[in-house]
Amino acid sequence: MPLLELRGVAARYGALRALRGIDLSVDQGEIVAVLGANGAGKTTTLRAISATVKTSGELVFAGERLPRRPEAVARAGIAHVPEGRGTFAQLSVDENLRLGAHVRRDRAGVKADYDRTLERFPILAARRGQAAGTLSGGEQQQLALARALMQRPRLLLLDEPSLGLAPLVVADFFAVVGELNEQEGLSVLVVEQNASLALASSERAYVLEVGRVAVAAASADLQRHESVRRSYLGY
Amino acid sequence: MLLATDWAGVAQQVVAGLSSGGTYATLAVALVLIYRATGVVNFAQGELAMFSTFVAWTLTQHGFAYWPAFVVTVLASFAGGIALERVVVRPVEGAPVLTIAIVTIGLFFVVNGVAFWIWSPEVKSMPNAFSTRPIRIAGVAFSISDLGIIGVSLLAVLLLWLFFRFTKLGLAMRAAGLNPASSRLTGIRVSWTIALGWGLATALGAVAGLMAAPTLGSFDQNFMQPVLLYAFAGAVLGGIDSALGAVIGSLALGVFLNLLGTYVSWVGTDLRQAAALAVILGVLLVRPAGLLGTAVVRRV
């Protein structure tokens, strides 16, 4: 049974139909990529999952219907790192991290995770008292990831983590995500504009086209399949 | 002018000004609290404080001493503020700021009218919160009541600050005010943090009303309206999104207005409200963000 399953999920912004009924699943411990051109519905797919857009269709998470309020989705065990990272610019790094653990009740576990997070991201430890808004883009992306991890989610949603970052910083970021996936079995659904990078770091991928799934395949197959790459991914 | 300067008199007037300023500060922080949670100035804040004061007055008419009535009223106001938010403000949550502001203006008139309906229009008087005797410090006689009001106001604001600074819920409330969308994604129940903000603001307003009422000698259902104006002026002066700014602004305004009323004979008490409006206007023209507020930069 998949960890997350979407069946015929549609979403719209007013009259604009951004998702026209997609089927998608993420298994436990899997990294899945969502690719496609601008306006294909990648971000909306994540927003549909976290209920920040009105949806129809069936969304099942860990065997149960996914609630349709963002705070309830977070409490169900899904962490969403949105476009623009969703950190609190005026609050300190420390406060951002503590907010990540807002839904948790296990104080000892939170404390342990807090220390581990600072070990994993030494730059955040150094900038602990600084306002998040004063961090560089790469540091903010680390903070966004670290904050999401403080929630100890079962599924992590990443929206265009590479946007606006230097290639080396992006490589580091994906290395950390891969590590978390291997060591802790964290499941990840990642939306990426950078298709080659996303395919290299994921097991399976969906290619969206105007709100529908055009191709669903193993990432390795997609990388090899030149005609698919040319027509959908443009490289 | 102050030719033969009476320094003891000035010190007394400064303390009396800080005392009024403390009351304004308490109400100003209530305004800041709701402003930060929802981006709206709660125009009904003063009337809610008036309503709380009348509840306390009723308790004192039924055998309660001042301080037990104070505690019961502040707690009841906290619960009442939450209930009010759920019933009146919740339906317009997420509506444009102007809509919510108009709802609070409507609330102003409703609360005022209901208070006149429940409690007859004749003036009331409240037992004193503090001893009416003066206390001599360094040879100058100060009113214990003034010092007590300063103490209670600052304590209320300090407790609130500690709550926001050091508790998990306080942090969640600050986050919810700064960025509701991101807060929801981290699992914060933003709708409830707004209700809680209303509860705290209403409780704080009750403190302000209960400090102001006894000093007036007698009061009616409109007694908090000038206080709301002064609190608003103090908050604007300090920066409407800064609690510390609102406290400093309100205290400064209290002292300024008191000295103005005492030493500039033609101002008296009549022009105090006009002076407060002049402060609001002046700050908005010269430094819209106030002393400690954050300037809002809008890209057009």
Image (tube, coloured by chain):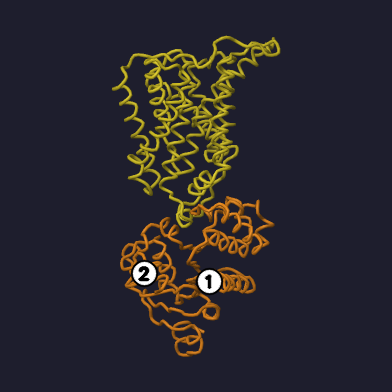
Chain colours: A orange, B yellow
Q: Earlier in the sequence, mark 2 or mark 1?
A: 2
Residue B229 placement (x, y as % from top left):
46, 28
Residue at 37% of width from left, 21% of height from top? B221
Residue at 52% of width from left, 35% of height from top? B236
Is residue B263 shown above or below A185?
above
Is residue A217 shown above or below B233?
below
Is residue A152 shown above or below B42?
below
* Quarter holding residue B58: top left
Quarter of the figure that contains the N terminus of chain A: bottom left
Is residue B106 shown above or below A78?
above
Residue A64 - label: none
Tag 2's secondary structure?
strand
| Amino acid type at mark 1 | Gly
Dot 1: within a 10 Å radius of its alpha carbon, few (fewer than 14), some, or many (20 or more) residues? some
Residue under label 2: A18
| Amino acid type at mark 2 | Ala
Q: Is residue B86 left or right of residue B11?
A: left
Pick the front one: A108 or B121: A108
Residue B201 placement (x, y as % from top left):
46, 35
The answer for how far apart the CA atoms under marks 2 and 1 are is 31 Å
Residue under label 1: A185
Q: Is residue B290 left or right of residue B218?
A: right
Residue A45 placement (x, y as % from top left):
41, 69
